[in-house]
Each structure stands twice: as C-alpha cells, then as structure tokens.
Amino acid sequence: MLKLFETQDGSNSVFSEKFGVGYHSKYGAIRETRHVFIEAGLFYRAIVKKDLNVLDMGFGTGLTAFLTFLEAEKLDLRVNYTAVEAYPVGPELTEELGYPASLQAMRHQAVFNEMHRSDWDSPISLTENFVFEKLLSTFESIELSEQFDVIYYDAFAPATQPELWQTPMMQKMYELLKPGGVLVTYCAKGVFKRTLRSVGFQVEALKGPPGKREMTRGRKQEILTA
Ligand SMILES: C[S@@+](CC[C@H](N)C(=O)[O-])C[C@H]1O[C@@H](n2cnc3c(N)ncnc32)[C@H](O)[C@@H]1O
C-alpha cells in the first residue's frame, strides 16, 4: 500500500507501507532528486558527453526520469533512459503526484503520463532525442546487455534493504558502467563507500541535499590510451 505525502519543498512523494519508508526526503522530493541525481550525475557527465545512456535503479514515481527529460531537453542532450522497477506505483497515485505542475512543465504532462502508461520492457521515443524504457524486474535479477554513462542508484536505504548496498550488487553496477561513467546516490554510509572502493570505484563524498551532510558519487576509471 502506497500513500501520498507532501515534502517540505511543496512537491509530493509516496510512503510505502510495505517497506515502511518514503520514496524521497521529507525535506523536498524535487530538491533531493535535482541535487543527487541531476546535478551530481547527469550534469557531471553532460559536461563531457552529449549522448548519454542513463540507468535509473528505482523508477518509483517517475520523478527522476521526468526531471532528466526536462533537463536533457534544455541542454540538448540525446538520452537513452532505462528504468528498473519491481513494484510499480499504480495510475491512481501517479495522477495525483502533480510533478508537471510542481516543475512548471505542464506542456510536458503528456510525457510524464507516457512514462507511466507505456508498456514495460518496450522502448519508446518520447522525442527524437529521448528514448525511454522501463523494465519490470528486481534489481537482483535484472540482466542488461549495454553499459551506462550514469547510474542513479535509488534503492531504499541500507537499513531497509541491506542486500542492495552490498558487494554483489555494487559489483553488478560497476560492470554496468562505461569507463568514465558514474553512479550517484544519496547514501553516504562509510561501509557503503568502502564496498564501492572494494569493487573498483573511485569514490567522492559530495555535499548532500537538505537534511543530509553528504552524498556519494562513484566513478569507473577511464581507460587511458597512450
Ligand atoms: C527510493 S524509491 C525510488 C524513488 C524514485 N527514484 C522516484 O523518483 O520516485 C525506491 C524504489 O525502488 C523500488 N524497489 C525496491 N526494491 C526493489 C528491488 N529489489 N528491485 C527493483 N525495485 C525495487 C521501489 O519500489 C521504489 O520504487
């Protein structure tokens, strides 16, 4: 069972009774998503690449996907966006989230709707420059044949889902990154950063969104040619 709640920046989020946690920070769903995933992830890679493969681990409300779409349009990026989700948010809630209005992006309401209504496991072109696919799968069982420039890692926190922050999953994420690619997440736990390092990531602690001192960016080293 999922319930809508309002966060402190005025944007909505949902609370999962199954997991006993909210999908976003109470300090602001849009503020957190923009800070952690868009600014530290998408913008960071967009400085050097305009053609990006993005993997969204936890499609949820679709907020990260929709924000990525809006920013990609502004920056004239070409994006192949893959989102993974095992427990979809139903249509009754997605209509109430109000993200296009909160983001002053009503002209893209149809894009947000399409992200939710589109078939699972079937890519669609939302625009000429933005291909979107959502995969109905658990993180544990997903198998992907391509590699990514940016991974938004947004599982529930380690206290709720410890197995999703441990070595096997981080090894899998490392293998899914292109050289030079980054994984960004709100989690800043020391044990998690050590796990990232142990599988090969270069780890940076960055300033966190409101309510969190730090967040984490893990980078897969570029292959240097002579
Ligand atoms: C913190 S929320 C992600 C919020 C999302 N980024 C958004 O913008 O709404 C975590 C998401 O991961 C999904 N999830 C949790 N465990 C999962 C698993 N083992 N495999 C796939 N998805 C999972 C949840 O259903 C939820 O949508």
Image (cartoon, grey):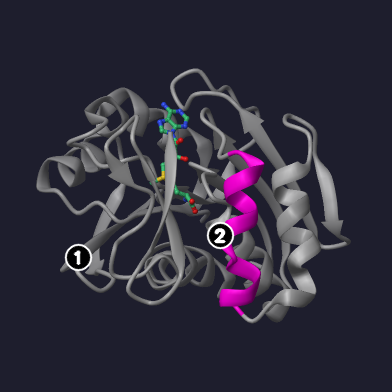
What x and y, as percent, mark residue 180? 48, 55
Q: Please state, as top left, top right, bottom left or bottom right, where the N terminus lies in the image.
A: top left
What x and y, as percent, mark residue 10? 42, 75
**Where does label 1 land, which residue?**
214
* Residue at 82 percent of width and 62 percent of height: 129
- SS of the residue under disc 2: helix
Horizontally, residue 11 falls left or right of residue 125, namely left
Horizontally, residue 127 falls left or right of residue 94, namely right
What x and y, as percent, mark residue 40? 41, 68
Q: Which residues are magenta?
A: 90-103
* Residue at 71 percent of width and 69 percent of height: 77
Ligand 1 lies in quarter = top left
Q: Quick one: which residue is furthest to the top in this view?
A: 141
Q: Tell me the distance, in whole angstroms, between the alpha carbons under discs 1 and 2.
A: 27 Å
Is disc 1 surrounded by few (<14), some (14 to 19) or many (20+) residues within 10 Å? some
- Inspect the magenta stretch and tell me whether residue 93 lies in it: yes
Is disc 2 surrounded by few (<14), some (14 to 19) or many (20+) residues within 10 Å? many
The secondary structure that dominates the magenta segment is helix
- SS of the residue under disc 1: strand
CB within 8 Å, label 1 to label 2: no
- Residue 91: in sight, yes or no? yes
Asked which quadrant contains residue 100, the reply is bottom right
- Inspect the magenta stretch and tell me whether residue 34 lies in it: no
* Residue at 16 percent of width and 42 percent of height: 194
**Where does label 2 land, which residue?**
97
Earlier sequence position, callout 1 versus callout 2: 2
- Report the front residue among 135 and 144: 135
Q: Quick one: which residue is furthest to the right in this view?
A: 128
What x and y, as percent, mark residue 109? 75, 66
